Amino acid sequence: MARSAVLNVMVQTAIKAGRSLARDFGEVQNLQVSLKGPGDYVSQADHRAEKIIHTELLRARPDYSFLMEEAGAIEGTDSQHRWIIDPLDGTTNFLHGIPMFAVSIALERQGQIVAGVIYNPSTDELYTAERGGGAFLNDRRLRVAARTKLVDTVIGTGVPNIGRGHHGQYLVELRNVMAEVSGIRRMGAASLDLAFVAAGRQDGYWEDALQPWDMAAGILLVREAGGFVSDKDGGQNMFDTKNIVVGNEHIHGALLKTLKKPV
Ligand code: 2AM
Ligand code: CA
């Protein structure tokens, strides 16, 4: 697998930020038992990782624009290229000492995602994809699972929480899906949910109330692994609608239908 120069930069950057997160995660685990808790520390870890990513990518491509979870949008002189970055996806997991979090970096060219990297430092799993070049887990080529019937599938999702998402609507969706599948999983890190679909570990996934940086790299991974990606209306406006549904052609279609079944 030959990686392009820009993908190499993204990989090196994600690993560097991931190492920083992994060091901080050790301390977070210690802080669980302290009265103050690890809250402030986690926010510092998040910012440290984002700083590393910003510095590295700015050095490699000084003109590109940025969209980052913490710093927001930074316009470069090159508005055709934009990095979309989540320095710490799965923040709640990280905060609670659950080793399921990742760095997610995507590159958009003229509004199209052309490269994506997701790195989970706890498992040392590196997911990469380039448009037209396939999706990989470390050096292994990825393919979405081939199951065609919902009854055989494990489906990932994200459950809304206090202050986030549409709780009533979600309960309808969950009721519809759980009645038809062999298992539901809730991982707490959208980037890894999408990577798991690309890797064929879960057959599909849906979630609402997501931000572009939660999804950008994962969208490309799923597509390059042969999967289908859309919002709940079947359109390609995931960044605007903030929701996403993925799976192979059959499971994606079945999920879209099942999610919308009337009560
Ligand atoms: P985060 O960990 O970077 O916040 C969990 O269901 C998924 O939703 C995670 O990928 C999480 O990303 C994302 N998410 C987006 N907005 C969120 C919010 N306000 N609160 C919790 N999770 C959020
Ligand atoms: Ca996120």
Image: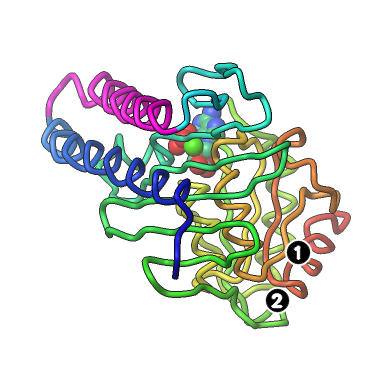
Quadrant of residue 214 in the image?
top right
Locate the C terminus by quadrant: bottom right
Q: 10 Å neighbourhood of mark 1: few (<14), some, or many (≥20)? A: many
Residue under circle 2? 150
Specify start and end residues of the magenta stretch as a single range. Answer: 34-60
Secondary structure under tag 2 reads helix
Residue under circle 1? 255
> Within the magenta stretch, is there residue 131?
no
Quadrant of residue 26 in the image?
top left
Question: Residue 140's spot in the image, x, y percent?
Answer: 42, 74
Label count reads 2
> Within the magenta stretch, is there residue 41?
yes
Q: 10 Å neighbourhood of mark 2: few (<14), some, or many (≥20)? A: many
Q: Amino acid at mark 1?
A: Leu
Question: Residue 25's spot in the image, x, y percent?
Answer: 21, 39
Residue at the spot 29% in from the left edge and 47% down from the top edge:
98
Horizontal side of residue 169 vs 201, given as left or right: right
Question: Residue 219's spot in the image, x, y percent?
Answer: 63, 52
> From this viewpoint, is residue 162 visible?
no
| Label number found at residue 184 | none
Q: Amino acid at mark 2?
A: Leu
